[in-house]
Amino acid sequence: MYIELNGLTTEERNEGSRNIDTMTTFEMLQTINNEDKLVALAVEKELVNISRAVDIIAEVLSSGGRLIYIGAGTSGRLGILDASECPPTYGTDPSMVQGIIAGGNEAIHRAVEGAEDRAEEGEADLRSISFSEKDVLVGIAASGRTPYVIGAIKYANSIGGETIAVTCNAGSQMARLAKVSIAPVVGPEVITGSTRMKAGTAQKMVLNMLSTGAMVKLGKVYENLMVDVEATNLKLVERCKKIVVEATGVTREIAEEYLEKTNYDVKLSIFLLLSSLSDIDEARKILAEGKGFIRRALNSIKQGL
């Protein structure tokens, strides 16, 4: 079967690296580094579309829906990576943000030949997690033409779900299908067609923005502190203490005291300290009424006074 790759920027040859096999090690790395500098600029051009996507994702999640990433190869692995970081960082339920890769779990570690070419499997994988109109799908593919992802987007559209495409080629089929298209065009790769490089970096940057932006809008960040972080290891236990200290200005000893009282609920500890409330149940109730936003909960107390 012939696959048309002509016209895809990500498949073009990079003239700046044409002789990379004759370069010194330093020259080779300098070439790669210079190309990597272009990625952030390409992402910057898509900020309007990224903003639209963040607003959609935040609305879906606040309404009880899920964020589902789907992709093949590097793109699929990046989605899984971003999804897997949300529970420890923001205290989310593991089902809230999920990553799906063509070929299943085996494909996380090694390539599953032909998995990305089957559009019907993209739909089947969404059906297997009961994807619904309440959810949002982010399809990820550097080329913008991966059949597996296209099949998933078409299915999500057909049942009324929100759809977002993250690609690295302008005017792709995925961009035309999705309700929001994010397409940072990073140009030809240093190694022709190796989209795990600049394209992968751009995709990672975009996914960082999507999940981080949504979590900020869900009240999981106070100032610039991750106040819903879970103390699942020794490093995170220390981070919890540091966050409470930085948010409130109390000593480490007082931070530890409040964290112990709240079973290491960082947000609740901060709110108790900033509000001067002594009743943990009352503080928890006010926070819940404020949808988990510390500032909103503090304002409600001021207004009550």
Image: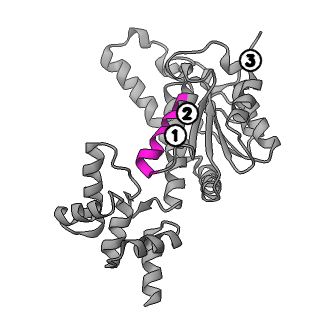
Q: Which residue is mark 2?
A: 186
- Answer left or right for 199 relative to 276: right
| Contact (Cβ within 8 Å) of mark 1 with mark 2 | no
Q: Which residue is mark 1?
A: 83
Residue, x 60% and y 23% (percent of image)?
Answer: 104
Q: Estimate the x, y position of residue 160 in percent, counting from the top left.
A: 79, 48
Cα distance in 3D space between marks 3 and 2: 20 Å
Q: Counting residues from the N terminus, which is met first, the one under dot 1 or under dot 2?
A: 1
Looking at the picture, tell me which residue is in the foreground, 211 or 284.
Answer: 284
Q: Is residue 214 visible?
A: yes
Q: Is residue 76 magenta?
A: no
The secondary element bearing badge 1 is classed as helix
| Highlighted range, magenta | 77-91
Task: Specify the quadrant that holds the C terminus.
Answer: bottom left
Looking at the picture, tell me which residue is in the foreground, 194 or 89.
Answer: 89
Q: Residues within 10 Å of mark 2 (few under 14, many from 20)?
A: many
Q: How many marks?
A: 3
Q: Residues within 10 Å of mark 3 (few under 14, many from 20)?
A: few
Q: Which residue is mark 3?
A: 4
Q: Estimate the x, y position of residue 64 in percent, counting from the top left.
A: 63, 55
